[in-house]
Image: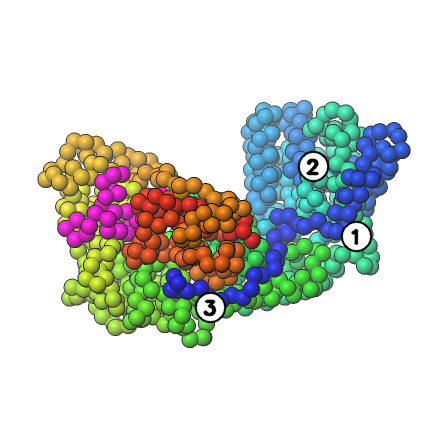
Amino acid sequence: MSESTTITAGLRQQEVYLDNNATTPVLPCAAAAVLHHMQTVFGNPSSSHSTGIKAKVELETTRALARQVIGASSGQIVFTSGATEGIQSSIVSALLDARSRGLTGPDVLLLYGATEHKAVPESLKHWNHVLQLGATVKAIPVDHRGLLDVAFIRNHVADAAMICTMAANNETGVKQDLELLQQVIRSANPTVSWMVDCVQALGKMSLDIANTSIDYAPFSGHKLYAPKGIGFLYVRHGAPYQPLIAGGGQESGLRSGTENLPGIAALHAIFTELRKTTGSVFQPESVLWQHREALLCALRQVFPAMVLNSNEPDIVPTTINFSVPGFYSKDIMDLFDAASIRISSGSACSSKIPTSFVLDAMGLPAWRSQGAIRLSFGPAMTPQECQQACTAIGRLTAIVQQCCLVLSDAQPLADLAMSGLTQLKHENLCSYLLVCADSHQAVIIDPVAPLANRLANMVQGQGLQLVAVLDTHLHQDRSSARDDLAALLPLSEPQQVDELGWPIGRAQINCGQYQLTSMATPGHSHDSRSYLLQQHQQTVAAFVGDLLLPGGIGRLDLAGSEPLAFASSVRTLLTKVGADTLLLSSHDYAQRFFTTWRLAQAEQPLLTEVVQAQQWSAAWTATLQAQSEQLCAANSYQCGVVEVSWSDAKAVVDAPQVQQFLAEYPLTVVVDVREPYEQSAGQLDQYLPTGVNIQHWPLSRLCDALISSALTPDQRLLLVCRSGNRSLVAAKVLNRAGFSEVYNLKGGVAMLS
């Protein structure tokens, strides 16, 4: 896509909120109850005067309603600050009881479902340590549907002091068969303490707590249209209980501290709606299933290849968890968020690509875990709100097709033609797509298998002719994706190629206005090559594989490495490139995107000595030895060692300061580093003053902006993305490249919208 062009996506859209499993808006009736009890019935329930008595009546009325809603005719209902407190209270009580009965040591088990909310295993580990039980905390496996392994429970629960399961999963919506679990648990261990996380169950599935042997069941108000900071805990009659909070003896001594009466009043309003047989804001289950089907239909229009990670009959209707081949969670979240549709990845962050520990536990393929999206609506969603959500999702269909995220039968659009260099990343691996818009030709360098479909869509969607697919060397950490691409994309001219994809007998590859030449640069491996990129007879960049990395060098201790050839290869390369020519690597371990010889010298001064000298120095030999030891000790395979960059934006600009900043510095260039599909779904100019100079340079096109000199170090730049994170990365990259006036919009478009 031309950086001066944006796709018209219509006027600013109204927000569509589809992340109700994370939290919900407060219902008007609940908000009114909160305000009433903050201003009118504001008494302390422990006070004996009339104002306090009114508050006490509200407290106990709500407690009685809670019993009715969850089917708990006996046992205790304790009001808490939310589910996390209820979980702590349950676990502390059960573990103290276990300790008093001598159930300690590694042979004693504390069991929890492998897909439980992290609050459960983390609390088990914490209190097991604090209370010095020394028990073994063990996860109960689940099958590919997310259902607990009953045989595992049967074989292990006899040795357990506590078992924790959940009624419905927060990521997948998968329901557990509580009746079956009870039969298995109690037949093997009648006295084990059993906690069931019911946070996602209330209002979505029937509960009959009194007819179970569940000991503890925590609930949270803000998951069902009440404010944050209120919840309640069910404790079965006779179950061990030790107050987590001591003090004035409120809640019959079970939880001290003045009760959150406004929050409890909100629960009263919610429970009243749940108890209505007609006229309730809560929809019948049949309507919720209809909503789900309508939303699925809209999603499939956008992503025909989407795959559900959980499905009927195992789920509550209000949760849709899906993945799309070729997409990471972040890709879809960024697209939807730009269109003012709020969804979630439901993923736990890792050092690389975020993955869903829930889907990992279910044994689903990595691409589904890395691409998992959770769309969750509330049981009070109206048909009108459902239709609004479906319409908003449907609008994305044209955008994902125009931006070549998915293929369609439509002809490529000329005004969306890509041009120049795009850098795509998978974890720390880099792939490159070079496109000449004039000749409609393309070359792919160092393709990564997980990006093969994305690359194929970009080439096919733009109607490009694929001239070549090249590797800089045979990568030892992965297989080449050239065969994968060959199955998806035919070359424009069938030709014989060598093992790295270079046409045999050709000195140069032409790609319209660009030319590529190959030169041997052994060192990292014996077959390593660099490809010089020329435009208008000028060398503007070089694809150097793992010869030099952004912030370091490729490792030289592998089978096939040629350390003595390394210096010679770098010297040869430097006869072809300038000190500031972009050197593009096949790995980027520190989010630097590229290096140059000037930067490489500054970041590793010994490189200059090695290149200029004709022999190895003792210092260089010691450096290589230290790097080799570091790499061999690393937890994961790495193709080189780099130092992390600490350069940063010159300053951050808060959203309220934007207009003042742009008025003070009218020549500022606002650089939108969001990807084209985000820019299309939610244009930036709707949030900024008229006449502001906005340039569209996605993070994946930042190298091309430098190659083409579209961004120059003498400009004052204000970088913007969705949340402020990617623009901060871009600020560091540009700062390292010599840009001195780089500013970052704190919080990104999220704070402007």
246 left or right, relative to 701:
right
Q: Is residue 516 above or below residue 133?
A: below
Residue 728 versus residue 201: which sits nearer the camera?
728
Residue 167 rendering spot, x and y as whole percentages = 67, 47
Residue 137 rendering spot, x and y as whole percentages = 56, 35
Q: Secondary structure at mark 2?
A: loop
Type of residue at label 3?
Gln
Type of residue at label 1?
Glu
Labelled disc at residue 273: 1
Q: Residue at x 75, y 56 (%)?
A: 282
Residue 4 rendering spot, x and y as whole percentages = 39, 63
Dot placed on the residue nearer the N-terminal end, 2 or 1: 2
Q: Main secondary structure of the magenta part?
A: loop
Magenta span includes 595: yes
Spatial distance from mark 2 to mark 1, Cα to Cα? 22 Å
237 left or right, relative to 335:
right
For the record, the magenta segment spans 574-603
Q: Residue at x 68, y 39 (%)?
A: 229
Q: Secondary structure at mark 1?
A: helix
Spatial distance from mark 1 to mark 3, Cα to Cα? 43 Å
Asked if one can make out residue 214 in the rendered structure from this viewpoint, the answer is yes
Q: Which residue is mark 3?
A: 401
Q: Residues within 10 Å of mark 1 (few under 14, many from 20)?
A: some
Spatial distance from mark 3 to mark 2, Cα to Cα? 46 Å
Dot placed on the residue nearer the N-terminal end, 1 or 3: 1
Q: Which residue is mark 2?
A: 81
